[in-house]
Amino acid sequence: MNGLILAARREVMTRIRTRAFVIGLIFTSVLVGAVSFAPKVLDRPDTYTLGTLGTQRLPLRAAAPDATFEWRTFPNEAAARQAVLDGDVDAVLAGGTTVLTNGEIDDRLGVLLQSADREAKLAAAGVSIPPLRMESIGADAHDQTARTGLAVVLVVVLFMMLIGQAGMVAMGVVEEKSSRIVEILLATLRPWQLFGGKIVGLGAVGLINLVTNLAVGLAASTASGVAGDFPPGMPGLVAGVLVWFVLGYAFYATLAGAMASLVSRQEEVNSVLTPLIMVIMVSYFLAFYATNAPTGTLATVMSYVPPFSSIVMPVRTAATEVPLWQVVLSMVAMAAAVLAALAFGAKVYQRAVLRTGARVKLRDVVRVR
Amino acid sequence: MLEISELRKRFAGGPDAPDGKLALDGIGFAVRPGRMFGFVGANGAGKTTTMRIVMGVLQADSGSVSWQGRPLRHDDRRRFGYMPEERGLYQKMRVAEQIAYFGRLHGMSAAAARKATEDLMERLGVAERRNDPVQALSLGNQQRVQLAVALVHDPEVLVLDEPFSGLDPIAVDALATALQERCGSGVPVIFSSHQLELVERLCDSVGIVAAGRMVATGAVAELRSAAGDTLRVVVRDAAPGWPDGLPGAVTVSGDRHILRTTSGDDQEILRRALKAGRVEHFGVERPTLTEIFKEAVT
Ligand SMILES: Nc1ncnc2c1ncn2[C@@H]1O[C@H](COP(=O)(O)OP(=O)(O)OP(=O)(O)O)[C@@H](O)[C@H]1O
Ligand SMILES: [Mg+2]
């Protein structure tokens, strides 16, 4: 165990000191921060510029408190028409009965004008109508947009982290194999210690990355106010994401490292990893699909099937309510898959890593002896 | 004592050699504590294969390696120092960190590893490169780091595959001194080399391998005397034909006749030589290791 920890620590220490790691971390943090502020910037309250002849105005503020209305007064109808055509104003209230626009009126503005006009006229006639009281009875009616946004960000982050860290394990294995340093390492360490140390070490680096990004994301969205739109149960969601990352990473990194131990040159790594990358890509697309239809059959089924579940399930939990027992069941299935991957990967690695030269055939390694 | 006995190893063959390649054909020898064992043999004789099997990075088909009377296990090997033929270091890791890392892998505490690293870097002349990544060093200096990695944990046994190749004379001396010191403190040392004068100078015993078998082992002096003494006589200004009837071979170089023989009555030869001309040299010579080696492997 001690050997595994030493190997893992070396991975962490050498990795976090590289410029690539520091720059990457800063870059993703800035990106996550920007994404957390984006909804507030893009989702600015509507602003309308309206023209009027004389002093007539409508009480629009009362009808739409979140929108801004700017009124301009024109001396005559010709000037007002010109302003409409030039696009200086969205609409002009011409007398008490007509609204001039350039093309069809903005839907919301049209409804607002109509209802404010009606209300004003009815009030003048002595009729007062109490406004309708709005009440949400759906659990997540309000934060559905926030949830979907969250799920999309999660898909991208998990995908990039999994593919990046698994790729790093693969490169590390080949680095040791091609530089022949495995020969002295394996005279002191057992293969599972060296391999396990690499997986644990680079996994820790991935977690440092993920936790930093999550922290930046949460802090930034609290600062920007977006956090207010988050669904209830964020702490559980975050904890779940971390567990899913660990499971998914353990699965993919083990297999990536084992496959990489078959080759002796960095240039061969890509070709030997292709099947695995395809699987990650499929998970990615399934998860993306799940952000749109989190309650659909495909998303539901795939959120139980390892290794796809490692991205699809966290995305489903972000996008909709998922009972805890379903999450736990899916985690257990994934954990079983991780154990199988570890058993298989360790065997392949142990048998292939000292065979330098031509690419070792998986068939030769797996064959029972 | 490290004992290697009856090792056999056949490498799987390719399409051109379906039977594979028999690399070791029952090789065996023993290295006593405090002895320096020189492992020599032609290219492809099986030295590296033997050492890899000793270090557990290759499995023998049959045969055994034992240490202190018990079969060698992984935990024993952790206390060995190994320098593989194909050098390997983390190219981007700094020199001092790398040596200390291997010290820790061999079970040293952080402080002990750091101290041993400092000492070794000083002795092997790489101290001023301590913070450079290995890839920035010249090949010979990388080799010194590789040696430091093999020596850092004060190993119980040293197995070094061609440790002297690529070193300059100063580094050769530094390494030779370091090895003699370890040897002096009771560590068995095995090293392979093609530099036979060096082997002759440093080693208590040598083993000559040919085609996966040990063809000669023993103390260098014993091997040399066992190979037989040669009588060499140099006679000046002698008439041609003087040694007719004597055993051995005569070569002529200028006005000198040189007779070499391993048999015959030396007194009779001396009398004949004195009669023939001026005897400049009359003496018994032992073959050098190089001569024994050539004899053994051909
Ligand atoms: N991985 C391998 N696959 C197939 N054959 C091998 C392999 N390794 C070594 N051999 C063969 O085994 C034989 C012994 O090789 P080995 O490397 O032990 O020789 P050596 O004595 O160390 O030679 P050198 O002085 O050149 O280093 C050689 O014929 C070599 O071709
Ligand atoms: Mg060799």
Image (cartoon, coloured by chain):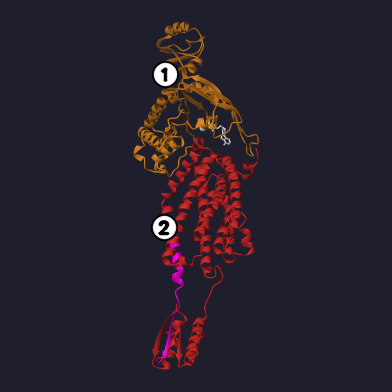
Q: Residues within 10 Å of mark 1 (few under 14, many from 20)?
A: few
Chain to which mark 2 belongs: A
The residue closer to the viewer here, B179 or A101, is A101
Which chain is tinted red?
Answer: A
> Which quadrant is home to the C terminus of chain A?
top right
Residue lying at 36% horizontally and 40% vertically, measured from the top left = B129
Q: Residues within 10 Å of mark 2 (few under 14, many from 20)?
A: some
Disc 1 or disc 2, which is closer to the eye?
2
Is any atom of residue B293 visible in this view? no
Q: Residues at badges 1 and 2 in contact (C-beta under 8 Å)?
A: no
Image x and y of residue A190, in percent? 53, 37
Q: Quadrant of ligand 1?
A: top right
Secondary element at tag 2: helix
* Image: magenta residue range: A25-54
Image x and y of residue A293, in percent? 60, 66
The kind of residue on which mark 2 rests is: Ile
Residue with the mark numbered 1: B254
The residue closer to the viewer here, B23 or A283, is A283
Secondary element at tag 1: loop
Residue lying at 40% horizontally and 92% vertically, measured from the top left = A54
- What count of labels does the image hold? 2
B87 horizontally vs B211: left or right: left
Which chain is tinted orange?
Answer: B
Is any atom of residue A29 visible in this view? yes
Q: Which numbered tag is attached to residue A26?
A: 2
